[in-house]
Image: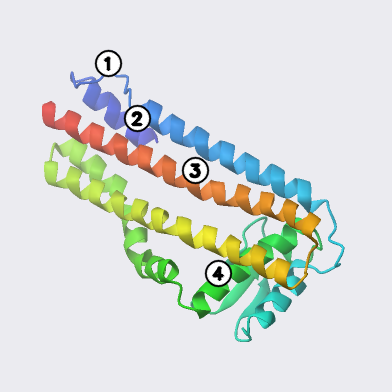
Amino acid sequence: MYLLASVNNYYYGRGGYGYGWGIDPTYLLAILGLVLTLIASARVKSTFNQYAKVRSASGLTGAMAAERILHSCGIYNVGIEHISGNLSDHYDPRSKTLRLSDSTYGSNSIAAICVAAHECGHAVQDQVHYGPLVLRSTLVPAANLGSTLSWPIFLAGLFLSMRPLLIGGIVLFLLAVVFQLITLPVEFNASSRALKILDQNHIISEEELKGGRKVLKAAAMTYVAALASSLLQLLRLIILARGRDRD
């Protein structure tokens, strides 16, 4: 952010299209994106913590529930591992491994079981070759490249006044945005599968399922907020690039 601020001071101080005193009005877009992300993050933590205190009547831990769900779907080649951290749960399609965090693996709360079930939803997607998941996995290298190189290339374009670098930075950033866009149906579908399996297998009661829906909905909104933040950043890049053309 310091480097970006330096670029903005350099550019707008030279009489760019922004307001006086070197102030970049597009910072508002970045701030709005940050606020959306923080709100979504606070909500998911608050919702998870609320239902992490509610013990499931089944007594199953997140790991036990995950094993039962996988087996009920005919999946026996996926391992379940404990990893450190909080809400760092994820499914790795490369190693066929479900990794559950400290707050999920050994906890028998409604929140833990539903988060574990969500990750099992990804394992089911992998088994049935769910289209958006396959596409997302294919785009991982391009998305990593875009998120790593987009800003350095774009900033170089601002410093050097080179339009090809500006466009290149925007295109690379767009790759990361497309990846986040494809992530939305993957995450929503995984939650939908999880809730359906939990209900069909009577792993948690209907009343507990209401809390589970709230947990997974709050988690899904973090992906929506991340996409919105990235779209605002993309808009900012476009505005800055157009401003450079006018300079």
Which residue is depicted at the point 36% across and 51% down? 177
Q: For residue 103, which quarter of the picture?
A: bottom right
Q: What kind of element bears circle 4?
A: helix
Which badge, 4 or 2, is on the more N-terminal residue?
Answer: 2
- Looking at this view, is 1 or 121 the one in front? 121
Report which residue position mark 4 lands on: 122
Q: Are marks 4 and 3 in contact (CB under 8 Å)?
A: no
Q: For the residue labelled by badge 2, is the local secondary structure a helix, a strand or a loop?
A: helix
Residue 187 lies left or right of residue 99; in this view the side is left
Q: Position of residue 222 (x, y in %)?
A: 54, 47
Residue designated by label 2: 5
Q: Say which residue appears at 43% left-offset and 46% top-offset.
A: 227
Q: Closer to us: mark 3 or mark 2?
A: 3
- Give me the C-alpha separation between circle 3 and circle 2: 24 Å
Front position among marks 4 and 1: 4
CB under 8 Å between discs 3 and 1: no
Are there few (<14), some (14-19), or many (20+) residues within 10 Å of tag 4? Answer: many
The residue identified by callout 1 is 19
| Label number found at residue 225 | 3
Q: Relative to residue 81, is residue 185 depicted above or below?
A: above
Q: Nearer the viewer, mark 3 or mark 1?
A: 3
Going from N to C along the chain, the mark reached first, 1 or 2, is 2
